[in-house]
Amino acid sequence: MNQDLSQASAASQPSTWSQRFESALHPAIAQFNASIGFDIQLIEYDLTGSQAHAQMLAHTGIIAAAEGEQLVNGLEQIRQEYRQGLFVPGVEAEDVHFAVERRLTEIVGDVGKKLHTARSRNDQVGTDTRLYLRDQIQHIRQRVRSFQAILLTLAEQHVETLIPGYTHLQRAQPLSLAHHLLAYFEMSQRDWERLGEIYQRVNISPLGSGALAGTTFPIDRHYTAKLLHFGGVYANSLDGVSDRDFAIEFLCAASLIMVHLSRLAEEVILWASEEFGFVTLKDSCSTGSSIMPQKKNPDVPELVRGKTGRVFGHLQGLLVLMKGLPLAYNKDLQEDKEALFDAVVTVQGCLEAMTILLQEGLEFRVARLQAAVNEDFSNATDVADYLAGKGVPFREAYNLVGKVVKTSLAQGKLLKDLTLDEWKTLHPAFESDIYAAIAPAQVVSARNSYGGTGFTQVRQALQNAKATLG
Ligand code: ARG
């Protein structure tokens, strides 16, 4: 049945092109030229855009009202056929736009040939792509929200769980684990906002720009824009058909989402290693080795980290695609679609996988984390701050603590192991409260500056994050 529909259409339409052409395309070139293999994904948007165009043609009297209705209904029938798997156009259709127009003419007869009045595939494909991306942006934003929600849930559970904080991947100062997780919440919040801003620029209608110069027909571009819920129309027809800034902006936003996911992925991979041991991977989200029976591999974050390069590649690809294009439409632009489609699928898949990973794929080893912050010199700044608080100039205190760390290391001791006498010999300002001051929980709690890791700050940040998610 599927094949029948498309073959019938191929047979009844000898060639796509005008009478100017005398012979058919070379089969390999037809294949090379065709985009139907991937732009079929745009079909629902193409149908919706064409329905709006047909309504506009009727509304402006360019075609009769009854004709407009026939076109709209015929397009709706194609939608049903497609959804039922009955409409499967092949390479002979070249692209989704031709495929739909041909099928429409089969369904409604000659009136189908009126659909393309006052329109070109150039403004049509721009419209379809924007309608598609608009929807995808909303889906991705929802996924970002789910990702933020699980970060928030975990953060709420781990306000007082301490984790070593790093700079240069060297132990720096201990942190509330919630603070660490909320850093990713903030990145994701920017991702969510950025997508919303980009949406505004995606949501502009190029329909009615024609091939490049507008049209001789008395069309109403604002009417189609309104039917399609666009926020505005392109002011310049050349720009309308050849602008792909919106796609590049989307790929930038997608790349940044991937940067954020990939950084977290990298941390999870480190944390799951024997050396760190900060998390345990659950069976539902990790895989084994085919040869080393002891292994449990962090495939999910590794794949996320790996797929990040693909999305960057699409951004780079589209930038390079655009840089040398003279106005207006050039066939090069057909190459924008696979980049967008793949980026959309990749970002959605990675957001979902990382959400599941956080939801049920890993467990923080709280005792191990606590032990880690107890066994290092990440409270050294606090000794210096302690002295500075007692009037010793900070740089002087800093130098002194540097010496203490050096001698303690040599003796295999930690700062908490020094006796009060030893402290006092180092500096008379030390008193017995030094031990409380350098205990990890106190070290974290004391960083109560706005946006810091102090528990009070973190609890406030949690409230804010909750309010953001509503
Ligand atoms: N399949 C084409 C694309 O994706 C549609 C526009 C073709 N326009 C043209 N003038 N050849 O860009």
Image (cartoon, helix red, strand yellow):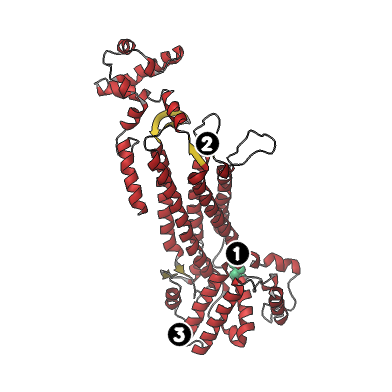
Disc with the residue nearer the chain's start (3 vs 1): 3
Q: Residues within 10 Å of mark 2 (few under 14, many from 20)?
A: some
Q: Which residue is mark 1?
A: 334
Q: Secondary structure at mark 1?
A: helix
Closer to us: 249 or 276:
276
The vertical placement of 426 against 390, above or below, is: above
Separation (CA) of disc 2 from disc 1: 46 Å
Ligand 1 falls in quadrant: bottom right
Left or right of residue 192: residue 308: right
Confirm if mark 1 falls within 8 A of ligand 1: yes
Badge 2 is on which residue?
Answer: 280
Residue type indicated by callout 2: Thr
- Residue with the mark numbered 3: 59
Please give the count of numbered marks on the rendered protein. 3
Determine the residue positioned at 40% across, 38% down.
Answer: 158
Report whether residue 330 is seen.
no
Residue drawn 42% across and 74% down? Answer: 226
In contact (CB < 8 Å): disc 2 and disc 1: no
The residue nearer to you, when weighing 97 against 179, is 179
x, y (%) of residue 50? 53, 76
**Quadrant assignment, res 370:** top left
